[in-house]
Image (tube, rainbow, N blue to C red):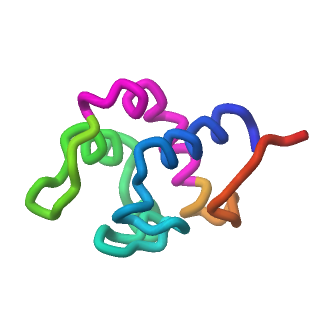
Amino acid sequence: MDADTLQGFRTWRAAACDRCHGANQEGMVGPSLIESLKTLSRDEFVTVVRDGRLDKGMQSFGSDQRVMDNIDHLYAYLKGRSDGAITRARVSAIE
């Protein structure tokens, strides 16, 4: 895994997104991100993460500097999971 995408995984873990979306991004209380990112554009993803969807229980991460500084990396990781390019939820650096 390249360093930027690995940083996206680390951001995923640090923000504890698995609490709602599941450890494998397949959904729990929150929807499956593997399915959602098949249709959600990058801009829509950023809006949802930044602003949340309070009516659906999705909190806002707009004030979480760690998440916002790594939003592109987070998107790349989750998009890779959605597209099947990243086949495992837990990843490591290329050695």
Q: Tell me, yes or no, whether the highlighted magenta stretch contains residue 4.
A: no
Above or below, 2 relative to 92: above
Magenta span: predominant SS is: helix
Instruction: Tally the marks.
Output: 0
Determine whether, in the image, residue 13 is placed left or right of residue 92: left
Above or below, 19 relative to 79: below
Q: Residue at x 66, y 40 (%)?
A: 6
Viewer-side residue, 38 vs 67 = 67
Determine whether, in the image, residue 95 is placed left or right of residue 57: right
Q: Residue at x 22, y 42 (%)?
A: 60
The region drawn magenta spans 62-79
Residue 35 position, x and y percent, is 44, 70
**Which residue is situated farthest in the right direction here?**
95
Viewer-side residue, 5 vs 18 = 18
Quadrant of the image occupied by residue 21: bottom left
Above or below, 73 relative to 52: above
Q: Residue at x 40, y 73 (%)?
A: 27
Q: Residue at x 64, y 40 (%)?
A: 5
Residue 18 position, x and y percent, is 44, 60
Residue 51 position, x and y percent, is 19, 40
Determine whether, in the image, residue 48 is placed left or right of residue 27: left
Quarter of the picture holding the N terminus: top right
Quarter of the picture holding the C terminus: top right
**Which residue is situated farthest in the left direction here?**
55
Residue 17 position, x and y percent, is 40, 54
